[in-house]
Image: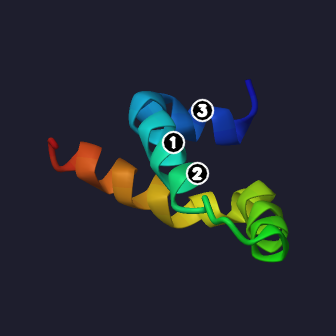
Amino acid sequence: MNQVELIKAPISKELKQFEALFATAFNVSDNLLGSVLNHLQQRKGKQIRPILVLLAAKLCGK
């Protein structure tokens, strides 16, 4: 298991819920916009902030 996976382990359930909600936010009917949004969705850098928020919430007990 690499270091990123170790960091994400305590919040794996919550992170899956976030990813599902994040994916629904990108559902659009326009093909061009959908293509651009799909590209953005594939970038895992967008997970840094949610990971930090979820870890902080776990640290505080929620």
Label 1 crowd (10 A; few <14 / some 14-19 / many >=20)? few
The Cα atoms of the two marked residues, 2 and 3, are separated by 24 Å
Q: Are marks 2 and 1 in contact (CB under 8 Å)?
A: yes
For label 2, the SS is helix
Q: Is residue 8 above or below residue 18?
A: above
Image mark for residue 23 = 2
Judging from the image, the colouring scheme is rainbow
The Cα atoms of the two marked residues, 2 and 1, are separated by 5 Å
Residue 50 falls left or right of residue 43: left
For label 3, the SS is helix
* Disc 1 target residue: 20
For label 1, the SS is helix
Which residue is at a point 65% across and 34% down the rendered structure image?
A: 5
Image mark for residue 60 = none
Q: Are marks 2 and 3 in contact (CB under 8 Å)?
A: no
Which residue is at a point 81% across and 68% down the rendered structure image?
A: 31
Q: Position of residue 21 (x, y in %)?
A: 45, 49
Q: Quadrant of residue 46?
A: bottom right
* Label 2 vs label 3, nearer the camera: 2
* Label 1 vs label 3, nearer the camera: 1
Which residue is at a point 27% across and 43% down the rendered structure image?
A: 58
Which badge, 1 or 3, comes first in the chain's sequence? 3
Quadrant assignment for the N terminus:
top right
Q: Nearer the viewer, residue 26 or 62?
A: 26
The Cα atoms of the two marked residues, 1 and 3, are separated by 21 Å
Farthest residue, direction front: 29
Kind of residue indicated by mark 2: Ala
Q: Position of residue 19 (x, y in %)?
A: 54, 45
Which residue is at a point 78% across and 61% down the rendered structure image?
A: 38
* Disc 3 target residue: 6
Q: Position of residue 18 (x, y in %)?
A: 45, 47
Label 3 crowd (10 A; few <14 / some 14-19 / many >=20)? few
